[in-house]
Amino acid sequence: PQPPAGQQVVVIGLGRFGDSLCRELMRRGWDVLGVDHDPVRVQKLSDVITHAVAADCTDPVVLQQLGVHEFTSTVVAIGSDVEASIMTTSNLLEAEVPNVWAKAVSRQHGRILERLGAHHVVLPEHDMGERVAHLVTGRMMDFIQFDDDYALVKTAAPGVVTGMPLGESRVRSKYGVTVVGIKRPGEDFTHATAETVVEHGDIIVVTGRTAAVERFTELDR
Ligand code: ADP
């Protein structure tokens, strides 16, 4: 789908995270200005993104020259150099740049970015570690948790929901979860309704409080 005209993002720091972010934004049809103080990183993306510039973003004058004000959002994707991440984020906020996203490498780093007033803080490694823990220890095939302790999980259907319409299995009142999608072997995912009959071997997508979803996925198949 075409984004509204003028959807442009600045990505500061073209490491692994910034690189993937730039590529996905381009794939989605957005304009991307990528900035890194390492010319090699800039060169690597110069044919891929709208503009790639070598510059040190801890310098407020550089940020001003790049015209970051004109963009819809700015992502500070500097990670390991925490000082550079903090200085850059702080300069962007001081200049009242809208929609500043910042990547943190630790909870502490994230807290500092939040205190500075970053509009959005993401902790990719921390979040992915938590997610993989769920996949490794449990029977979840995928796990996404939202801020308020609410999760969305892909799992093989437990026995308690099979062989009857979902409406009759009363999963919501008994287990506190809602089955929202179902995939039969060899088919695509479709929406689940109260009439859907889940069979043994089906894969389902379930939402609910994280603890409830975790308990539900531990039930016998
Ligand atoms: P990742 O884990 O995504 O690879 P890194 O922290 O290794 O993250 O990479 C961040 C990128 O940010 C690096 O390419 C680095 O050169 C760049 N960077 C660090 N400091 C600055 C700065 N002051 N201005 C611009 N880019 C910077």
Image (tube, rainbow, N blue to C red):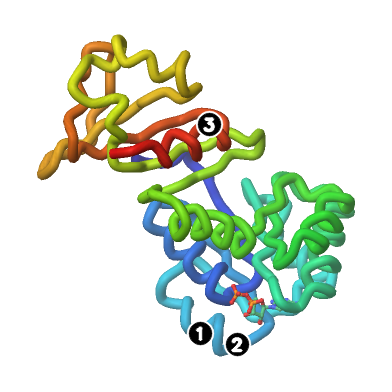
Q: Quadrant of residue 33?
A: bottom right
Image point 28% across, 39% down: which residue? 221
Percent x, y of residue 153: 42, 40
Residue position marked by numbered label 3 in the rendering: 212
Image point 47% across, 77% down: which residue? 46
CA separation in Å, label 3 and label 2: 49 Å
The one of 133 and 107 positioned closer to us in this rendering? 133
Kindly identify the amino acid type of the residue bearing the numbered disc 3: Ala
Image point 44% across, 17% down: which residue? 172
Percent x, y of residue 183: 21, 36
**Label 1–label 3 contact, CB within 8 A:** no
Label 1 crowd (10 A; few <14 / some 14-19 / many >=20): some
Relative to 108, 201 lies left or right: left
Residue position marked by numbered label 1 in the rendering: 43
Percent x, y of residue 41: 55, 83
Residue 93 in the image: above or below residue 62: above
Image point 45% across, 17% down: which residue? 174
Label 2 crowd (10 A; few <14 / some 14-19 / many >=20): few
Mark 1 lies on a secondary structure that is helix
Q: Who comes first in sequence, dot 1 or dot 3?
A: 1
Mark 2 lies on a secondary structure that is helix
Relative to 182, 75 lies left or right: right
Between disc 3 and disc 2, the foreground one is 3
Q: Which mark is residue 39?
A: 2
Mark 3 lies on a secondary structure that is helix
